[in-house]
Amino acid sequence: MKRIVMVLAASAAVGGAAPAPAPQANYWMDVATASGMGAGMMGGGGQPNMAQVMQMMQGGGGQVMHSVNLYLSSKQKPAAPQASHMIPAGMRMGPSLPLIAPAAARPEPRSDGVPANFQPPKGKMLIYWGCGEHVGAGQPTVIDFASVAKGKMPAGYAAMVAAVRAAQPPRQGQSAGYGEWPNTRDSRPVPPAASLLGAHKIEANYAPPIAFTLAQGQDFMPGLGLREAGNMPSGAVRLAWTPAASATGYALSMFGATAAGDVVMWSSAAKAAAMPNMDYLTPAQARQLVASGAALAPGTSQCVLPAEVAKTSPSGMVMMIGYGPEANFSDKPKSPTWTTKVRYKTTASVMLGMGDMMGDAGPGQPQPQQPRRKRKFGLGDLIQGATGLPVGN
């Protein structure tokens, strides 16, 4: 008998406990704030439409926009799926938001936002990095597009690509049941004064009831107010912003061109790096980036764009992200029936030399319709589509 017990114990030790069953439903809520010239273009994903471009040209540069993207996935799939997110009154968008699966996506020639007849650029790409009045030794890294076309990459480029990848929310086709917002039925913009605080409930005929409450500190992150804070005699540009209390780190980048048409890229990373990751990152990932020098610490409020970069591309576009917190909920700690993940970020952008020329948009100004986030479109997408180079987004 003793031997049998020992054999059973050994078998259990080797086999281990049976894995817990996966939740019946998973719900993701992506919460973004965007300010500056990129407001309305970066916050809700998707490419900017003409209304958004016109708003920027008519003085919307200083506005702060909020956006929310909702994703529900489930193991169940009824014949007539119905799902809604019951929202708190503070959102000022009515009692609920419908969660609808998009129609089957039509095949497109390209999904990176670059025209099908686009020709890869000629010339070079100059990559700089680091905050400070002057660039460090060994800069810039020069990439010759003609060499890239032949499969030749400069030494060390692989190490420059962001190694941290953002987790992706549920997508259509990954589960039996799926719904998202915004969608074709409802893509209203989130009001400027909206608040997420309060009780949230998701009801669907293909998922168990989901309920959670967002408390103080779990609302939209504030706008960063990225701005030029003056030029130094050397030509370097002081960039300043208002730190967000809940930010876990910051990253800045600039994209521009020389007079000869060469591409210019810069990042605030302390070491050689291409474009920073402008997506949602977990607090642990952000801490990793801060520790390695790839991102700036949460309390940072300024960065100097090196003189060499500012002189090379005096009209470049500077973008930044404040990585935010993350909230996770479930109906029970072990073997949950459902899980919910709420992610936050705040982004901002400014064009060098523009100062406050774009003006501020008051809360009374109409906001463009929130774009559906079928796929995030950002500067990294443009660069990657144009050059074929991975940029780590």
Image: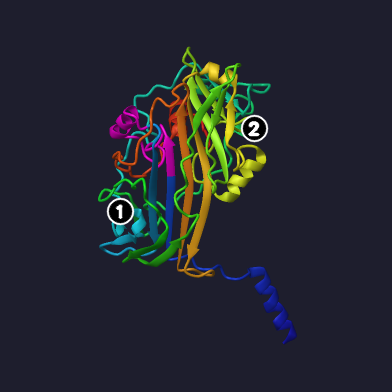
Image mark count:
2
Q: CB under 8 Å between callouts 1 and 2?
A: no
Task: Tell me the kind of residue under disc 1.
Answer: Met
Q: Is residue 10 visible?
A: yes
Magenta span of residues: 33-60
Nearest-to-viewer mark from 1 and 2 = 1
The residue lying furthest to the right in this view is 2
Q: Nearer the viewer, residue 383 or 243?
A: 243
Image spot of residue 357 (x, y percent): 40, 25
* Residue found 30% across the figure and 59% down from its top: 96
The residue lying furthest to the bottom in this view is 1
- In this rendering, the answer to whether 262 lies above or below 165 is above
| Residue 105, quarter of the rendered image | top left
The dot on residue 270 is 2
Q: Is residue 143 visible?
A: no
Question: Left or right: where does residue 351 sit relative to residue 294?
Answer: left
Image spot of residue 374 (x, y percent): 36, 44
To which residue does mark 1 refer?
93
Task: Tell me the kind of residue under disc 2.
Answer: Ala
How far is disc 1 from disc 2 in space, using C-alphas? 43 Å
Q: Residues within 10 Å of mark 2 (few under 14, many from 20)?
A: some
